[in-house]
Amino acid sequence: MKTSTAVILAAGRGTRFGDMTSDIPKGFIPFKGKAMVERSIRILIDQGITRIIIGTGYHAEQYEALALRYPQIETVFSPAFAQTNSMATLQCCRHAIGQNPFLLLESDIIYEPLAVRELLDSPHPDIMLISPVTKFQDQYYVEADPKGNLRNCSTDKGALTPDGELVGIHKISPTFFSAMTSEYETVMEKEPSLGYEFQILRTATTKIPMHVLSIQGLKWYEIDDASDLEYAERHVDII
């Protein structure tokens, strides 16, 4: 089944940006003059994605306004965004996603089109994209097993033998997503702050394998705060 849907998780408050996100969600922080999320949207459309679901929360109205400019966008509001985390936002999007395979992205990453192209072209139905470790803080390290499937991920480098760093772009099949959301329903009240990547890990290691795809030399960066933005502006060569 062709992947023509993407989901962008964009509900977070972006508190680490301080005053920079007092009036805008973090996806609207500009990198080299253009909002990070809009950069992502344009890449997705250029690569053949025809439907983009954005899970919103903080300053949701700004994403709704963006949807007026891009007919490919639909927004899904996560009402408990202030008390939950990215997995709860993704869970809110499940009805909009339906039985479609999709790309899953974070709103605060910049990347070159190669990242999306490689995922779409790969025959694997479920993929976690990684690259060699490039970030100086807040890394999610990823370890694959000998078959190239996800074995572990952690913010603690000493907890695993890392094969690379989580980029924040995935490809997910309907089968994997169904298992993922069904499992999350059993723990969501106890773990409202669960990040989507850790639910992916649970599902991949107990139910359905997820392939780990490493792209050497991929140009990308996750921008979590003002120091990340300053570094990226200086050192990340993405137009």
Image (tube, grey):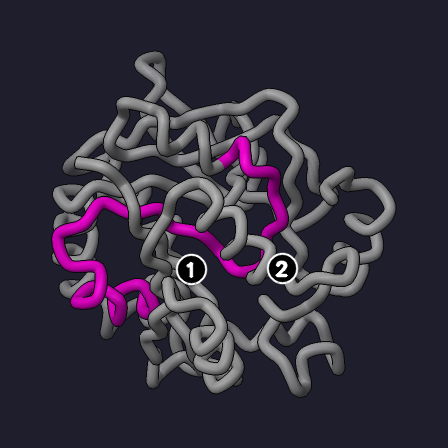
Based on the picture, tell me whether residue 101 belongs to the magenta stretch: yes
Q: Which residue is mark 2?
A: 36
Instruction: Name the disc covering residue 164, or none.
Output: none
The quarter in which the N terminus is drawn is top left
Vertical comparison of 52 with 13: above or below: above
Q: Earlier in the sequence, mark 2 or mark 1?
A: 1
Secondary element at tag 2: helix
**Magenta highlight range:** 88-115
Left or right of 226 on screen, residue 38? left
Image x and y of residue 216, in percent: 59, 21
Return the x and y of residue 218 as percentages of the image width and height.
62, 29
The answer for how far apart the CA atoms under marks 2 and 1 are is 12 Å
Q: Is residue 80 visible?
A: yes
Residue found farthest to the top: 146
Q: Which residue occupies 27% across, 41% down?
A: 3
Side of 235 relative to 70 (left or right):
right
**Does the magenta segment cover residue 163?**
no
Of residues 197 and 35, the one nearer the viewer is 35
What is the crowding at mark 2: few (fewer than 14 residues within 10 Å), some, or many (at least 20)? many
At x 39%, y 32%, the residue is 119
Residue at image position (36%, 26%) is 121
Q: How many badges with numbers are in the image?
A: 2
SS at badge 1: strand
- Numbered mark located on residue 8 in the image: 1
Q: Amino acid at mark 1?
A: Ile
Location of residue 22 (image quadrant): bottom right
Q: Residue at x 55, y 28 (%)?
A: 164
Q: Identify the amino acid type marked 2.
A: Met
> Left or right of 117: which side holds 222?
right
Could you tell me residue 180's position as x and y percent? 20, 51
